[in-house]
Amino acid sequence: MGMRYERYDDAEVTEFRVVAAPDELVPALQRSAFTERDGCWVRSCPAGTPHVDDAWVNFQRLAEPWLRQLAGLEPVLWEETLDLVCRRLEGIDWWLTGSAALAARGMAITPGDLDLVVSGADSHRAGELLLDGLVEPVAAVDWFCDWFGRAMFGARVEWAGGVGPAADQPEITDFGPHAAARLDKVRWRDHDIRVPPLDLQRAVNVRRGLTERVRLIDQFAD
């Protein structure tokens, strides 16, 4: 069974729906925070969100590659994607977190995606600069951040805009204000990239039970 999609619009919401997907991609849909409803999988944004039409065109083209990567069926081309992000987002207030931040330090880790923290003021601009890969338009969210956007190139790129104190509750994270106040700068290829402090990333991975990643962090720190 191949992928099939449909779009729904009303006065309040736009929905991108996956109405058919192979069984092997269902866990990836769940991990991507799709809502299962009436036999399909849904991602939504407020009606009238800027660039929603562009994102819909891209979604139909790029949802399957993103889900196949997440399912471990295709390689994640994170290096070429990070290079693209660094070039495209020059002048934007952003930094890199998650496993990609460890990989950018030089650790033997293959990230599943690129997680960015972007200033609230630059959140929509980031979406415009990544428009040709935008699969979810930058939209307001009621989360630990004010804005969220998602793009797909050789790897998935997700950014949280306007991250607030809720990100560090109930425990300090590697993407909240505590990390933002203590960023390191690493040289990766020809780019200077800001990343969270290593001790915060270690603590996060300890809590997640990722023992091999903790071992790599300890080995790197020595």
Image (cartoon, grey):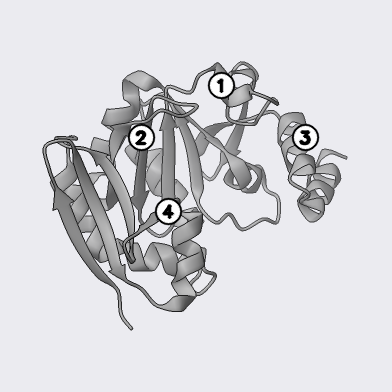
Q: Position of 137 compared to 219: left or right?
A: left
Q: Which residue is mark 2?
A: 89
Q: Position of 174 compared to 41: left or right?
A: right
Q: Position of residue 77 (x, y in %)?
A: 47, 61
Q: Which residue is mark 3?
A: 203
Q: Is residue 213 above or below residue 21?
A: above
Residue type at mark 1: give it.
Ala
Give me the C-alpha separation between circle 3 and circle 1: 18 Å
Q: Position of residue 135 (x, y in %)?
A: 29, 51
Residue at 45% x, 26% y is 145
Pointers 4 and 2 in contact (C-beta within 8 Å): no
Secondary structure at badge 1 equals helix
Check residue 166 in the rendering and tell me which mark sits there, or answer none.
1
Residue type at mark 4: give it.
Arg
Q: Position of residue 19 (x, y in %)?
A: 28, 68
Circle 4 packing at 10 Å, graded few (<14), some (14-19), many (20+), is many
Residue at 48% x, 58% y is 30
